[in-house]
Amino acid sequence: MVLAGKKKTVLKSETSKDLVCPKCNSKNTTKISIFGIYKHLVHIPFISGGKSGKSICTHCQETYKLSNMPATIKLVYYELKETTKTPIWFFSGLIVVKVLILLKIFSRYI
């Protein structure tokens, strides 16, 4: 049983209307996905591990990670990444721990 680790989940996906696949020259087939990475303890998310992404052509199945992504796709990727927010539930374990600590502190005064 794994007690701690990292998990990845899709935060946002978008098929760009303007991009042309560099491999098959198909237009309107490049899907860009932004993934959120979070660190968990007993499958409860504690802190965000950042965002990453990849693009895939739905026509020829060519996949690009950020390191080998063409400049035109990379520009659209960064625009999508900027508009994608990290969900609050990535910090749910941390929030619960803080609330429990505050309850313990303030229970002395009640």
Image (cartoon, helix red, strand yellow):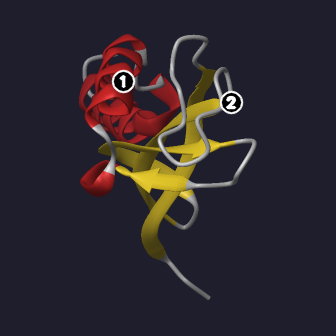
Q: Secondary structure at mark 1?
A: helix
Query: Can you tell which mark lies on residue 81?
Result: 1
Query: In the picture shown, does residue 4 fall above or below 22?
Result: below
Q: Nearer the viewer, residue 60 or 109?
A: 60
Would you identify the image quadrant in which residue 28 lies?
top right
In the rendered view, does 34 fall on the left or right side of 58? left
Instruction: Count the marks.
Output: 2
Q: Nearer the viewer, residue 35 or 39?
A: 35
Percent coordinates x, y for residue 79 in the rendering: 33, 15
Report the residue marked by disc 2: 29
* Residue 67 visible in rendering: yes
Near-viewer residue (29 or 91): 29
Residue 49 image label: none
Using the rendered view, name the quadrant where residue 15 is placed.
top right
**How crowded is the residue under tag 1: few (<14 C-alpha within 10 Å), some, or many (20+)?**
some
Q: Indicate the position of residue 14 as horizontal and vertical percent values.
A: 61, 22
| Left or right: 53 as drawn, with respect to 1 | left
Identify the residue at image location x=60%, y=32%: 30
Q: Point out the tag, 2 or 1, that comes first from the N-terminus.
A: 2
SS type, badge 2: loop
Q: Amino acid at mark 2?
A: Thr
Type of amino acid at the residue the image marks with label 1: Lys
From the viewer's perspective, is the residue at label 2 or at label 1 nearer?
2
Residue depicted at 33% across the width and 46% down the height: 69
Quadrant (top left/top right/bottom left/bottom right) for the C terminus: top left
User: Which residue is painted at 31% across and 48% down in the image?
Assistant: 66
Q: CA distance from mark 2 to mark 1?
A: 19 Å
